[in-house]
Image: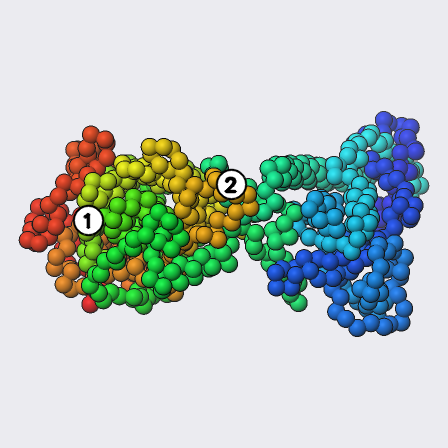
Amino acid sequence: MNPLCCIAPVSLEHAADHLHHHQPPPRILAPAPAPAPPPPQPAAAAAAVAGVLHKWVNYGKGWRSRYFVLEDGVLSYYKLRGGGGGAGEAAAFAAARVIGEGGALRRAREEAAAAGKQWRPFGEIHLKVSSIRASKSDDKRLYIFSGTKTLHLRCETEEDRNAWIDALLAAKDRFPRSLTSNDLGPMADIMLSTEKLRVRLLQEGLGETVVKECESIMMSELLELHNQIKSQQQQHSILIDCLRQLETEKVELERTVVHETKERETHGYANGRQSDFYSVLSGGSTSESDPDTASQVAEVETEEDEVTYFDTRDFLCAESLRSASCRRKELIANGCNGSECVGESVTNTVKTTKYPFVLRRDKLPEPKEKEKPIGLWSIIKENIGKDLSGVCLPVYFNEPLSSLQKCFEDLEYSYLVDHALQWGKQGDSLMRILHVAAFAVSGYASTEGRQCKPFNPLLGETYEADYPDKGLRFFSEKVSHHPVVVACHCEGRGWRFWGDSNLKGKFWGRSIQLDPIGVLTLQFDDGETFQWSKVTTSIYNIIIGKIYCDHYGTMRINGSGQYSCKLKFKEQSIIDRNPHQVHGFVQDNRTGQKVAMLIGKWDEAMYYVLGDPSVKPKGYDPMSEAVLLWERDKSLNQTRYNLSPFAISLNELTPHLLKKLPPTDSRLRPDQRHLENGEYEMANAEKLRLEQLQRQARRLQEKGWKPRWFKKDDDDSYRYVGGYWEAREKGSWDDIPDIFGQNSASPGLP
């Protein structure tokens, strides 16, 4: 028999009472038991509170009665479904202090009695992490902020509201926010004795050597147990520190929200639309919602206990946008255009240019292979420590378009420039710059929902777009590899558009920030010129989550004539329920006076309001007079690339067009063509081959390589030197290199 089998378990506290007389007792450290918690307060101090309150649901349902129960720091609410009767009241509700009276309360008691413990709450709010506020505009309403949602509640009387607020604050005070030192027990010296074990083993007739061995085994086991307890205590300490940090951040966030709310109230902007309207005039971004407005957060209740929120307060809500859009269509139907029906200064109409119809494809080819998506993190993980610029990403992260073709997407709504041309011919410079501003914003509409990156062009790669159905022809070329610069030039009927683009990227861990460098120029035949730069673009959730992009910053459109424009792209926040907003105004260059306001969203529509917005009366609703300038084409093709019909046509290659293109055109790029056809393995192989050629481009550039169709001017920007369309007409591409390394026709061409 093992000699340890006869040892009975002895507690550390009991063993500490006996000391070893023959040798110094072993001494170890162990966590002392935490002090006992203080006795609970009397039941009267923590009595439950119950009553019926009206809770705001949404604009469809409005205020609905709910039965609320406050108990143990948790506010629960129940649906009132009608009916009643039962065996008696539930014990928990019968003992609660009731606030208010009336038929709804009696019905709630009957339902609670009938359901008993089976009556489950529809929602719960933990007051420890919540804040309570009384409404300043309605003496019967109060708000509870939980960090993730806001409860808008209304009582029957002011006395009931005060009673509820007192009860909620009292319950919240019983749960301190900060953690104390009592969360961790102190370390204490504990003396352990093996005297009883020694005596018992000697009684069994064991020798001194065996006794010492047994003592050593026992002490080693106790030391291992001590180490495990110490490790658990360290993990507990780390967890407590994390909780403290989260608690501190939540308190700071709550203080910030309350501070911004109070700041808005001090300015007297009770109406949400008016507040956002005046923020446009000051040049700042709109602040967060005022909790005193019941429509700030509309909560939708369903039988599946799901909660959805809608931002119905902002003057750029969907309802307002649809209303202004319908009003614009009514004006056009009645023979009105531009500002003739909404302003007194302009009475003319703009003439719409008619272009011939050109049949273009409306869908991509059906994929020939099944897609094998790969996570970006798996690629980065396998290349840790390597130069990521030399890592070839699979084509699964690309869309079948190049950056040169993406530049042409900015001209999808080129009809706005045609309208601006006509307004200028009629002498209306204000309507001209309004349409130019809408055109500058419309270039971002195609980025919404596009999660794949375009192909990076090779040095010297070009792209042409001859679109008689839009009355323009476009040409672009990659003019530099380090840094990557793409230059473009477009000729319309009565106007020209050119610019170059260079992106300066910053990696922030979960997102990439792209700061554009370069100036875009739009010049009309009458000499008036407008120049602007693009705003910052950020791509979020590149490692985990759904990828999305946002555009933010200030865009200044400088005009050489009478007017200039300033547009503010509002940055999207994690709590923003109405993103992608654009606000701005048009200013007279001579007087500095604001003469019009622009409002809208870069992915939906843009509107204008004539007149100086700073002289509008208090409470003015800008959407009541807003007129539609531009509206996005919502017809998206159901592909994983979310390409618009216009974008689908950019890479179309017909046999007639193939005969005219130079060997540098993006349509002839093999990996891009294979990806469009759904030939993923071949696309990956070609992309790897072209990436190797791309790495040689820097050496070519260092040897003095210069672009063929663009030249850098004195302003360090690239300008089109001409000659491309003439060479295309002659078909003389003898001096143009085959940068894709192939002499055959484009793959997949029918």
Residue 606 percent across, percent down from the top left: 40, 51
| For marks 2 and 1 on the same chain, the one whose residue lies earlier in the sequence | 2
Residue 688 percent across, percent down from the top left: 28, 50
> Mark 1: few, some, or many residues within 10 Å (few <14, many ≥20)?
some
Residue 19 percent across, percent down from the top left: 90, 30
Quadrant in the picture for the C terminus: bottom left
- Looking at the image, what colour scheme do you see? rainbow
Q: Which residue corresponds to the image point at 81% horizontal and 51% vertical from the top-left?
A: 160
| In this rendering, position of residue 308 left or right of residue 723 | right
Q: How many marks?
A: 2
* Front-most of residues 590 and 352: 590
The quarter holding residue 630 reads bottom left
Q: CA distance from mark 2 to mark 1?
A: 37 Å
* Front-most of residues 548 and 228: 548
Res. 40 in view: yes
The amino acid type found where label 2 is placed reads Tyr
- Per the image, the residue denoted by label 1 is 494
Q: Which residue corresponds to the image point at 74% horizontal and 62% vertical from the top-left?
A: 65
> Mark 2: few, some, or many residues within 10 Å (few <14, many ≥20)?
some
Q: Which residue corresponds to the image point at 33% horizontal and 34% vertical from the top-left?
A: 589
The amino acid type found where label 1 is placed reads Gly
Residue 179 percent across, percent down from the top left: 75, 37
* Front-most of residues 330 and 318: 330
Give the SS element for disc 2: helix
- Per the image, the residue denoted by label 2 is 278
Res. 639 in view: no
Q: Which residue is at the far top? A: 24
| In this rendering, position of residue 51 left or right of residue 304 | right
The quarter holding residue 174 reads top right
